[in-house]
Amino acid sequence: MTATNTGNEGTFDTEASKSITLETLVKIFGDLGASNIYIKKLAPNDNSKNQIYFGSHLTDLPFIPSGELIGSNTESMKTIDSKRKIKFQTSVNFSWLDAHGRTYSAPHTKLIYYPQYPEVRFSGFLRGSNTKASEWMDPYKQGRSLGRWLIMGTTLDEKVYGYLVSPECDLSKELEATSLIEITNVFRKFDTEQTGITDTKSALLSRLYEINQMGWIAGQKLKRGIIIPYKAPNGGGYTYEAILGIEPNSKAEPDYLGWEVKTFGVKRFPKTGSKPTTLFTPQPDGGYYNIHGAEAFVREFGYPDKKGRLDRLNFGGRHVANRVCNATQLTLNVEGFDPTESKITDALGAVTLTDSLNNVVASWGFPKIMDHWKRKHSQAVYVPCLRRSAASGSEYHYGSDVELGIGTDFEMYLSALVQGMVYYDPGIKVENASTEKPMVKERSQFRINHRNLYGLYKELEFVDIAASRL
């Protein structure tokens, strides 16, 4: 129900808002389809002038759905602060709601990332909205008051609803006494499913141990809530996701309790002979590839299949920064980034593939890669996996010695790319190349050798989940 405010009473100053309980508010969120509820206690600087601080990096906020990320280098004279000359912003489909469940669209809401601070700010949340919240967001009125809270609910269709709690409300005191799940140093999550979980790391490790104790598991995949057999030999990740209740590619956000879950193949336990890990597979958004398409790109820069498979063209090979790839004679570069300072110097920078004449044949703008990194890699767990053949197809056994990657940002990814830890390892092919209906497979993947994972995280923790239970 969309509302228009009339009269002088503020949206969050009504008698209903002063007496509303958390239980009632959670039901209102639920009626709007918002099952995940996140809570931030507002600081004095969290107001309409200074914007609301949400974290240091976009990787802190994978749980907030947002639109296309756009980078800009401002030449505005409104600020002489060089730290605000580079920014990335993304829209948020945000609406306020009141204690009666009425909603007030805030069409100009966005997240702004200033990489040179670094910090992410929530902005534009009052502009163009009929909600009356300026009393508690204006720094010259009550916008610096302690005891204010921001509650946000997210939906499966990527809407975000917000509710402002003033210090005068009973709910402000209730939140002080409520146990919440810590997900970042800024945000807490309300336990809507009443799991009793307050520590997501401990809950994650407990679940991983249960899967480890299951032994060999037949290959499977979750599709529309139903587990189906999966016989192909690349099902280690699908099988693990199915057990965790995750459908492949269902949502571009962390998999389980806010953690990205990744399996990697090994030859035996404890992990040995680990294979490279695929971080993500973004398609180029610039260069010849983007202009002419994958098929034309492979025909121009690819090569005949090296295993002798007829009528097939490939584009592959390990592309490491600042080195010519033998397979393609192309060079991977990182433009607009200072590796010495580990800082972005150009918001319009990109990861590029160039030919011998320095022509850009494919590129990935910083906003595109940053958006992938934001959604998937705030914190991750890496689980070793054995595979064996069986009458039913493939079976998998998951090891107990896991690795937890905690704390990352886009600049760490770019640094790892420049240092050669992360590399571009495409698997693009054109089959039936000489026919009128060639078959094209696009796979532009960035990968890392397992031994180099430490370069992506502020903390890489090794945990034997079986030994920890003794």
Image (cartoon, rainbow, N blue to C red):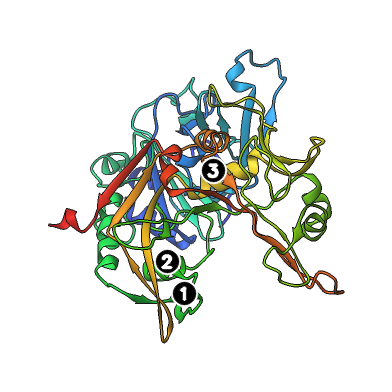
Q: Nearer the viewer, residue 470 or 20?
A: 470
Say whether marks 1 and 2 touch (CB < 8 Å).
yes
Q: Residue furthest top?
A: 80
What is the spatial separation of the Cα atoms under label 1 and label 2, in whole angstroms? 8 Å
Q: Is residue 238 left or right of residue 130?
A: left
Could you say where residue 118 lies in the image, as x and y percent from the top left? 50, 27
Mark 2 burial class by Cα count in 10 Å: few <14, some 14-19, many 20+: many
Q: Residues within 10 Å of mark 1 (few under 14, many from 20)?
A: many
The residue beneath circle 3 is 422
Report which residue position mark 2 lands on: 241
Element at label 3: strand
Which residue corresponds to mark 1? 221
Name the one closer to the observer, 144 or 117. Answer: 117
Residue 71 shown left or right of residue 165 in the figure: right
Q: Position of residue 70 (x, y in %)?
A: 67, 38
1 vs 3, front mark: 3
